[in-house]
Amino acid sequence: MIYDRLENSETYSAISERLAEGFRLLQTTDFSAIEPGKYEVDGKELFFMLQSYQSKELNDRPEAHKKYIDIQYILEGEEQIGVGALSEMVEEVSANPDGDIWFYHGPVTHFKMEKGNFAVFFPQDAHAPGIATGDPAPVKKVVVKVLM
């Protein structure tokens, strides 16, 4: 997992060209002009989901992906995300291989995401997003999906 501010994303661009392309997308796109939804950039190799939702009091089902890296970037609001090692998850709760998402139960550590923060989750990172930092509140976030 990587946690940082978008202005520092160049530091991580050498990891892969697709990851660098994902960061460029976040830096150059006016998301205020786009409706929430799923948008292809380079077919299934790089796409993003613009999300607008209410944070929730609890997310006790960390998720993980096997084919994609997530770059999660907060546009408005704030939330906590729980993160834990996939190898430490104690139970698989459900799976949707076609959607590249598996849900688990297991230990996580929480960190706060605010406007301008991003987190990169690799396949070994189970993550539980969307948790309120106080009372549930609106969040606007971009999730860039980068094919491994």
Image (cartoon, grey):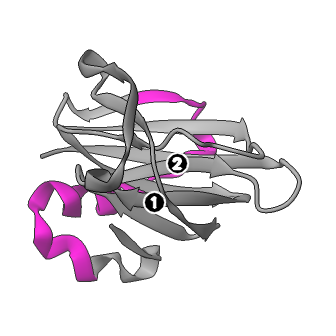
Number of labels in the image equals 2
Residue 32 within the magenta-colored segment of the rendering:
yes
Give the number of the disc on residue 128: 2
Quadrant of the image for the N terminus?
bottom left
Q: Which secondary structure, mark 1?
A: strand
Which one is in front, 20 or 30? 20
Which residues are the magenta region?
11-38
Q: Earlier in the sequence, mark 2 or mark 1?
A: 1
Q: Position of residue 61 (x, y in %)?
A: 52, 38
Q: Position of residue 14 (x, y in %)?
A: 12, 74
- Seen in the image, is 99 located left or right of residue 109? left
Q: Quadrant of residue 2?
A: bottom left
Q: Position of residue 65 (x, y in %)?
A: 28, 39
Residue 95 within the magenta-colored segment of the rendering:
no
Which one is in front, 106 or 29? 106
Whether residue 100 appears in this view of the structure is yes
Q: Which residue is mark 1?
A: 83
Task: State how far apart marks 2 and 1 are (Cα).
Answer: 6 Å
Identified at 89% across, 53% down, the residue is 135
The amino acid beneath tag 2 is Ala
* Image: 27 above or below 137: below
Identified at 32% across, 62% down, the residue is 23
Q: Which secondary structure, mark 2?
A: strand
- Assign the magenta stretch its main secondary structure: helix
- Seen in the image, is 16 located left or right of residue 91? left
* Image: 102 above or below 18: above
- Seen in the image, is 37 located left or right of residue 80? left
* Image: 109 above or below 11: above
Identified at 60% across, 66% down, the residue is 113
**Contact flag, marks 2 and 1 (Cβ < 8 Å):** yes
